[in-house]
């Protein structure tokens, strides 16, 4: 059978990883796909620049439209990232009747509904395993491996860069900016690293996972997003003292039929005995709980050339195998047929109930803690633990840390506003949610 002819958009870290992987495991991949997979044409912003891969047999161009318009190609792999021109390029490739494989989570999370409609009309495949959790085949696991289940929740560490930063802050007490620069050097971070540290990248991925898990349309704008830039090494140390680790989590929870789905990305204290608390460095892990399977866990490297290329090539193998299949019989993009997507609403974060870690700078004087406790008590917020640290030399206020039992977010917001209004509390209250994941 003739080779699958592929066009590649982007020859950066991941693009070079894909070229290298197709060469290194050439025979294994061809045996699995039933056909050889050949990259014939690739677009790079600077085609003459030295690369981390051999481009000897690849025609290089600076114009990505030349690649998507090349009639010889069957499949386009999009690895340039960002929304535009990636969206325009993919739509043009689809309109040209080509299958597409992408690692672009922002594109799928924000424009997937439109892209899938185009692909359905043209009878081509859109594959995006590499968009979520790097080398972990999490999309396949939920979409196919768990197809018999009613998914109740998923919770995971789905941004390698932020996990790398939090891990280094925990073990080495390293500065945030210094660790971020290293993550960029290692090719983990997004082109705009604020997407990593402000939770946006994780929210893109959660949007995709939630759609596949619950059969809802992609709804990125409904995800509550908070990043890790406000987390200090003190918070990491206090959390440890209380028996927790701080992780950036993406959580999607189906609250039951008609009760809505909550989608949120934020840092959280996770009990140190939980597996997710011990997922370190650039590793990702996703816990998916379904009926009847129970809790399942998927773990692996979430970013970098090799892991992402592993997912891209798996998609290429699928495309090669499914090429001649009737489109109606392919696995649906979001696990459910498009006409069967659910209209279960996504609820706001104020409706979510969880535990909290509060840190505040309190005047070191009698009655101050009593005032704070009264505000929490008036809001029916029960305290689980309190920690008061020593004041810094020459300072008359002290860090106070409070752990609460479960309370509705909206109620906690009101209480925090009242605590911040106390004259004896300096500045803002730091609030980090506590997730026991049970
Ligand atoms: N910037 C992403 C991360 C890359 O750090 O997880 C993988 O999507």
Image (tube, helix red, strand yellow):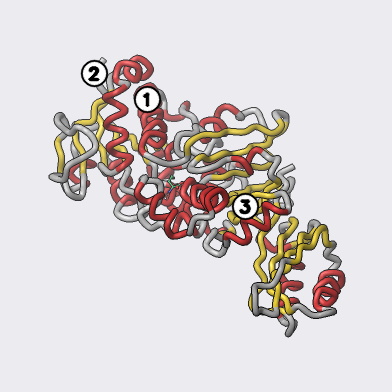
- Which numbered tag is attached to residue 2? 2
| Viewer-closest of 17 and 84 | 17
Q: Residue at x 50, y 43 (%)?
A: 281
* Residue 258: percent from left, percent from top: 73, 50
First in sequence, mark 3 or 2: give its number: 2
Q: Mark 2 or mark 1, which is nearer to you? A: 1
Q: What SS does tag 2 mark?
A: loop
Quarter occupied by the C terminus: top right
Q: Callout 1 environment at 10 Å: few (<14), some (14 to 19), or many (20+)?
A: many
Q: Residue at x 36, y 38 (%)?
A: 305
Q: Is residue 126 left or right of residue 12?
A: right
- Residue at 66% in and 60% down: 432
User: Which marked residue is nearer to the observer: mark 1 or mark 3?
Assistant: 3
Cβ of mark 3 under 8 A from ligand 1 = no
Left or right position of 193 against 149: left
Q: Does residue 83 sit above or below 358 in this rendering?
A: above
User: What's the distance in space between the residues labelled 3 and 2, CA to CA?
Assistant: 51 Å
Q: Position of residue 291 (x, y in %)?
A: 72, 32
Circles 2, 1 touching at the beta carbon (< 8 Å): no
In x, y percent, where is residue 9? Answer: 26, 42
Q: Please indicate, yes or no, whether residue 245 appears anywhere in the rendered image.
A: yes
For label 3, the SS is strand
The residue pinned by badge 3 equals 246
Marks 1 and 3, how far apart at CA: 38 Å
Q: Looking at the rendered structure, which numbered label has been put on residue 317?
A: 1
């Amino acid at each position: 059978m003739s080779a699958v002819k592929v066009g590649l958009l982007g020859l950066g870290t991941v693009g070079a990883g894909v070229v290298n992987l197709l060469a290194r495991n050439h025979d294994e991949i061809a045996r699995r796909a039933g056909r050889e997979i050949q990259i014939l044409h690739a677009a790079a912003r600077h085609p003459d620049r030295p690369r981390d891969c051999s481009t000897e047999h690849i025609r290089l161009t600076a114009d990505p439209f030349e690649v998507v318009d090349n009639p010889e190609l069957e499949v386009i792999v999009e690895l340039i990232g960002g929304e535009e021109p990636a969206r325009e390029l993919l739509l043009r490739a689809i309109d040209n009747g080509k299958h597409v494989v992408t690692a672009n989570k922002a594109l799928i999370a924000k424009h997937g509904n439109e892209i899938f409609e185009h692909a359905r009309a043209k009878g081509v495949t859109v594959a995006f395993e590499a968009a979520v959790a790097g080398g972990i085949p999490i999309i396949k696991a939920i979409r196919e491996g768990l197809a018999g289940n009613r998914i109740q929740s998923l919770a995971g560490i789905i941004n390698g860069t932020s996990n790398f930063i939090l891990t280094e802050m925990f073990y080495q007490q390293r500065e945030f900016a210094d660790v971020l620069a290293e993550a960029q050097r290692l090719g983990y971070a997004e082109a705009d690293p604020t997407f990593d540290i402000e939770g946006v990248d994780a929210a893109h991925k959660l949007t995709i996972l939630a759609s596949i898990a619950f059969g809802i349309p992609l709804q990125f704008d409904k995800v509550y997003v908070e990043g890790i830039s406000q987390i200090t090494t003190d918070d990491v140390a206090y959390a440890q003292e209380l028996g927790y680790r701080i992780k950036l989590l993406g959580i999607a929870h189906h609250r039951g039929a008609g009760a809505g789905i909550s989608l949120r990305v934020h840092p959280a204290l996770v009990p140190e005995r939980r597996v997710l608390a011990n997922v370190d460095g650039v590793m990702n892990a996703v816990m998916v709980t379904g009926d009847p399977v129970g809790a399942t866990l998927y773990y692996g490297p979430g970013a970098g050339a090799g892991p992402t290329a592993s997912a891209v090539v798996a998609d290429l193998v699928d495309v090669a195998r499914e090429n001649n299949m009737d489109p109606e019989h392919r696995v649906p993009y979001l696990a459910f047929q498009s006409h069967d997507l659910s209209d279960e609403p996504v609820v706001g974060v104020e409706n979510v109930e969880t535990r909290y870690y509060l840190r505040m700078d309190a005047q070191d004087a009698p009655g101050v803690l009593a005032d704070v406790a009264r505000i929490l008590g008036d809001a029916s917020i029960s305290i689980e633990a309190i920690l008061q640290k020593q004041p810094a030399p020459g300072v008359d206020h002290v860090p106070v840390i409070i752990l609460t039992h479960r309370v509705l977010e909206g109620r906690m917001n009101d209480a925090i506003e009242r605590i911040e209004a106390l004259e004896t509390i300096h500045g803002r209250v730091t609030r980090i949610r506590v997730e026991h994941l049970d």
